[in-house]
Image (cartoon, rainbow, N blue to C red):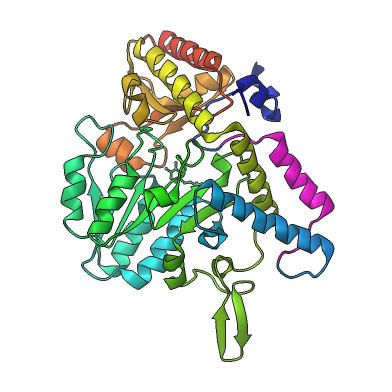
Amino acid sequence: MKRFSVEQIRSDFPILKTKMNGKPLIYLDNAATSQKPRQVIETLDNYYENYNANIHRGLYKIAERATEGYSGSKEKVAKFIGADSMREIIYVRNTTEAINTVAISWGDANVKKGDHILITEMEHHSNIVPWMRLAKKKGAVLDYIALDKNKCGLDAQSIGGMLDKRPKVVALTQVSNVLGSINDVKEVTRMAHKTGAVVLVDAAQSVPHMAVDVKQIGCDFLAFSAHKMLGPTGIGVLYGKEDALEDMEPLLSGGDMIKTVHYDSYTWNDLPWKFEAGTSNIADGIAFGTAIDYLNTVGMHNIRAHEKKITKYALDELDGLDGVTTYGYGAKDIEKRGGVIAFAIDGVHPHDVAQIFDSEGIAIRAGHHCAMPLVTERLKQVALSRLSFYLYNRESEVDSAIAAIRKVKKIFKV
Ligand code: PLP
């Protein structure tokens, strides 16, 4: 796209023309899932209407077309994140499944009793619980990199201190889904590799919103979900360095992931198919490729620039409201944060906030955001409300959100 135009982008998203509670829908829950452009929806329809067939098996035209579409989508993903080839791109259901695959498959073979596993205090449950289970199973120790004193980013000293324990694996998020903070995963990876650790990056909130290059980061594994980046639900990515994936056992076994099977033996298929047992999520995989095309056309740098602008505007507006607290870096540190703003209104439960927003046609998330330790133990809140932006959000929608907060304040006399 030569000139970034929110209005042109919005015209591609049918759902943005709908109403919620009689008001035009304002969708500010993009960290949970994104909306889908017409092009992605049409790709799904087109597959089912015109070339629905299983991949890798059929020796007929529509099966070949389906196989090409599915593999082609992986080629696009590989290029999008700077991977060497699609051999490094495993399709799974979502970020959660990608992280579990590493924690179970890689973890089982490499983590022993007494080993350390290192994550951070700002992780989503899907990057905590699989490691906790692994630690429990193996008798390993789960350590956390602490938040800095302002509870915005990671504490530099804590990173160094925890790495001194020589963890076997470091797993951290690139962008927090609560604080919006962007972690320097490149630097953490460099430091972790020096101590011999393997690094997994949870990129669920980064790959959809900014240019991410796995080679530049240098990480061993990276996980993200298509549904947060204009693609369908039910498809996600585990990127792994080829060597790491070659060494790993697949989680599931059965059809398609094998090359040969005899009554007494088997051999695995080549990467990436070794990790994809059974019939793949073909339609969603192909449509994911269309989502990548869409993001490339708009340009990831344009998307990041737009989100920075709208987030800064929202932070400035929120700053002027008495009784409202925002979390994470402020407007002046916009380079260090993504388009996620968690906030609290004095004495008002976030569920009440979300309900009033709903009555105004505004979709936001309220709760612990699947980051209970961070929200309840570090930020000391029972729950938080959250605005999260994407490429189709307008500044006028921020104004509507601010007006809804004023309404909450009036009702609850804050
Ligand atoms: N990690 C982060 C930082 C997230 O924000 C999310 C979802 O919100 C996930 C992991 C899990 O993603 P999924 O539910 O697609 O597996």
The answer to whether residue 25 shows anywhere in this view is no
Q: Which stretch did the figure color magenta? A: 34-55
Q: Which residue is drawn at 15% across and 50% down?
A: 161
Q: Quadrant of the C terminus?
A: top left
Q: In which quarter of the image is residue 292?
A: top right
Q: Quadrant of residue 375?
A: top left
Label tally: 0
Query: Which residue is more in the foreground, 305 or 135?
Result: 305
Residue farthest to the front, as pictured:
2
Is residue 274 positioned above or below 96 on the image?
below
The answer to whether residue 387 shows anywhere in this view is yes
Residue farthest to the bottom, as pictured:
264
| Residue 114 rendering spot, x and y as whole percentages | 20, 67
Q: Is residue 198 found left or right of 8 in the rendered image?
A: left
Is residue 301 positioned above or below 55 on the image?
above
Query: Which residue is more in the foreground, 295 or 1?
Result: 1
Q: Residue at x 29, y 64 (%)?
A: 136
Q: Quadrant of residue 331?
A: top left
Q: In which quarter of the image is the N terminus?
A: top right
In magenta segment, residue 190: no
Q: Is residue 261 found left or right of 102 in the rendered image?
A: right
In magenta segment, residue 45: yes
Is residue 273 positioned above or below 380 on the image?
below
Query: Which residue is more in the foreground, 226 or 365?
Result: 226
Q: Is residue 177 found left or right of 92 in the rendered image?
A: left
| Residue 269 rendering spot, x and y as whole percentages | 58, 74
Q: Is residue 39 found left or right of 74 in the rendered image?
A: right
| Residue 239 rendering spot, x and y as whole percentages | 48, 56
| Residue 314 rendering spot, x and y as whole percentages | 43, 17
Query: Which residue is more in the foreground, 232 or 384?
Result: 232
Q: Which residue is drawn at 74% across and 64% down?
A: 54
Q: Which residue is drawn at 48% across and 30% down?
A: 304
